[in-house]
Image: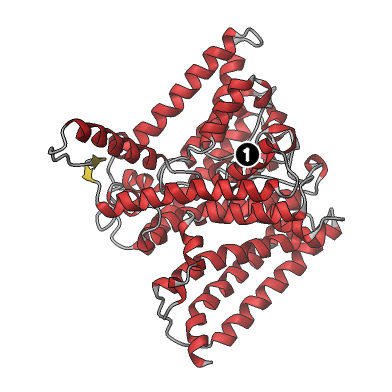
């Protein structure tokens, strides 16, 4: 029994602080609606008290002891803390929104903290501000959480091949910031600063103060929760807002380690990074080709077409998931293109989900070398990326991630189809959950719909898909293997 308690102690310690943190962030929504919506505000007060009491109880149970964390415990801490935070996020929604089921509340919370942006709620335009703020806070916390996870934890676990690209190529480890905790403090400051800048930009572009605050949170987190059923389409009459949103979604999709490097004197950090150059070039090409085609169709003028294309393409590629138009009505080619770019995420060490862009670049380097070796079998070709050699470890992790990424989507789509969903809905819902994009395709889960009509079974499957995708697949899968539990 003592051995089990010692093994669980670090995990319970983290869950305790997650509970206390959840209780603390319940307070701003409580204060916001305290004088206007008594039922809504009290649900946050009760949730805050419950979460803080649970956190204190866990700390008292653990007691004062020196905690040593093994790799196996770190995997469990990562998965359990994100799952537990989703449970905490569901409590105020379940207590405060009439007729919402716990399944729907948990789905909304999981979508929030994984910055997926899929929603089961309708009538957002009239929802109390406290719940809109709560959704934004969940995504904002999830956004900075995934940055810390991707830069400080996943490289240590060697998950997804990020060690080389999230640390060494970004040139911060042991150089710009010598200690990890100091580096994370820098990341936090940058994240807050960019959020505040986005808030001011939204306000200057014509948003109200509350909308500017919440949308700045969900934009930098590349989460996509909006305060309106029409998402960012609510602001179509103010195109400057869409352009500001497009810019800050891109900012959230760039490596935050490079922001730190830039602030510490490396003014060419972004320009020298192959991943950033490739990602921005790809985005620009997609926007150019798409806007030209839309303008030739003659349906709208070129500027309006460019605005809509730029916003929606960036929203999908960065996995933010905002929508300003139902792009599934742009033509069958648009459906295919948006389905393809749904799998392409931002840069490593960013708030974006999906397959980080460096994985495609590494795969391209390996493919190019393999084609050359087919003609010159005895040649010795070094595989280099971003000025560094691609090690066997990186190659193996990228290949493993790519396989399980595709396998997870295929399996999830199959399971969703067994709940009665059609092919387009099953496939796009599975893809959007694992890639953490938000809207899928089709009339049910597309940009003009939401996930409320799905069965509870489908929603729980999608919650699992969102968690697996957000934690880079392998982090979750490994804990279900027999070898993981062998002592």
> Which residue has dot 1 on it?
428
> Could you tell whether 149 is left or right of 132 in the image?
left
Q: For the point 75% across and 53% down, which residue is it? A: 130
Please report the residue visible at 78 percent of the width from the left and 42 percent of the height from the top: 124
Q: Is residue 478 above or below residue 458?
A: below
* Residue 393, quarter of the rendered image: bottom left
Q: Inspect this view and state whether residue 194 appears.
A: yes
Element under disc 1: helix
Q: How many marks?
A: 1
Quadrant position of the N terminus in the picture: bottom right
> Residue 415: horizontal and vertical position, in percent?
66, 51
Residue 361 percent location from the top left of the image: 34, 37
Q: Position of residue 176 (x, y in %)?
A: 28, 53
462 or 41: nearer the viewer:
462
Q: Is residue 351 visible?
A: no
Q: Does 378 appear above or below 310?
A: below
Which quarter of the picture shows residue 372? top left
447 up-or-down from 37: above or below: above
State which quarter of the image contains the C terminus.
Answer: bottom left
Q: Residues within 10 Å of mark 1 (few under 14, many from 20)?
A: many
Q: Residue at x 42, y 85 (%)?
A: 66
């Amino acid at each position: 029994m003592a051995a089990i308690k010692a093994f669980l102690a670090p995990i319970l310690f983290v869950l305790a602080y997650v509970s206390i943190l959840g209780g603390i962030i319940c307070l701003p929504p409580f204060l916001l609606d305290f004088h206007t919506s008594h039922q809504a505000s009290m649900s946050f007060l009760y949730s805050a008290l419950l979460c803080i009491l649970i956190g204190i109880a866990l700390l008292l149970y653990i007691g004062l002891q020196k905690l040593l964390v093994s790799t196996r415990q770190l995997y469990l801490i990562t998965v359990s803390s994100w799952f537990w935070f989703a449970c905490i996020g569901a409590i105020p929604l379940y207590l405060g929104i009439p007729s919402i089921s716990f399944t729907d509340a948990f789905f909304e919370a999981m979508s929030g903290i994984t910055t997926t942006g899929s929603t089961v709620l309708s009538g957002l335009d009239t929802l109390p501000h406290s719940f809109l703020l709560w959704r934004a806070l969940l995504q904002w916390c999830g956004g900075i959480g995934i940055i810390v996870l991707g830069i400080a934890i996943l490289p240590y676990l060697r998950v997804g091949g990020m060690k080389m690209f999230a640390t060494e190529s970004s040139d911060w480890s042991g150089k710009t910031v010598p200690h990890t905790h100091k580096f994370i403090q820098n990341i936090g400051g940058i994240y807050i600063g960019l959020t505040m800048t986005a808030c001011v930009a939204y306000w200057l572009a014509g948003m109200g103060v509350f909308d500017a605050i919440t949308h700045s949170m969900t934009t930098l987190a590349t989460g996509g929760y909006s305060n309106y059923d029409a998402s960012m389409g609510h602001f179509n009459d103010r195109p400057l807002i869409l352009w500001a949103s497009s810019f800050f979604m891109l900012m959230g999709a760039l490596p935050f380690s490079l922001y730190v490097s830039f602030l510490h004197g490396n003014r060419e950090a972004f320009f020298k990074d192959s991943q950033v150059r490739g990602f921005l070039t790809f985005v620009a090409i997609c926007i150019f080709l798409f806007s030209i085609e839309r303008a030739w169709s003659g349906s709208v003028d070129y500027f309006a077409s460019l605005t809509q294309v730029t916003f929606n393409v960036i929203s999908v590629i960065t996995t933010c998931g905002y929508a300003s138009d139902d792009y599934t009505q742009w033509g069958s080619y648009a459906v295919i293109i948006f389905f393809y770019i749904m799998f392409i995420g931002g840069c490593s060490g960013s708030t974006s989900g999906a397959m980080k862009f460096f994985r495609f670049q590494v795969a391209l380097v390996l493919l190019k070398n393999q084609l050359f070796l087919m003609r010159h079998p005895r040649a010795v070709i070094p595989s280099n990326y971003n000025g560094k050699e691609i090690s066997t470890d990186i190659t193996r992790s990228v290949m493993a991630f790519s396989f399980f990424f595709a396998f997870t989507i295929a399996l999830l789509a199959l399971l969703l189809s067994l709940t009665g969903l059609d092919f387009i809905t099953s496939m796009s819902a599975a893809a959007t959950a694992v890639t953490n994009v938000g809207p899928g395709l089709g009339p049910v889960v597309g940009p003009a719909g939401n996930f409320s009509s799905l069965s509870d079974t489908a929603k729980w499957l999608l919650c699992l898909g969102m968690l697996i995708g957000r934690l880079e697949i392998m982090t979750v899968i490994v804990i279900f293997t027999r070898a993981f539990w062998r002592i």
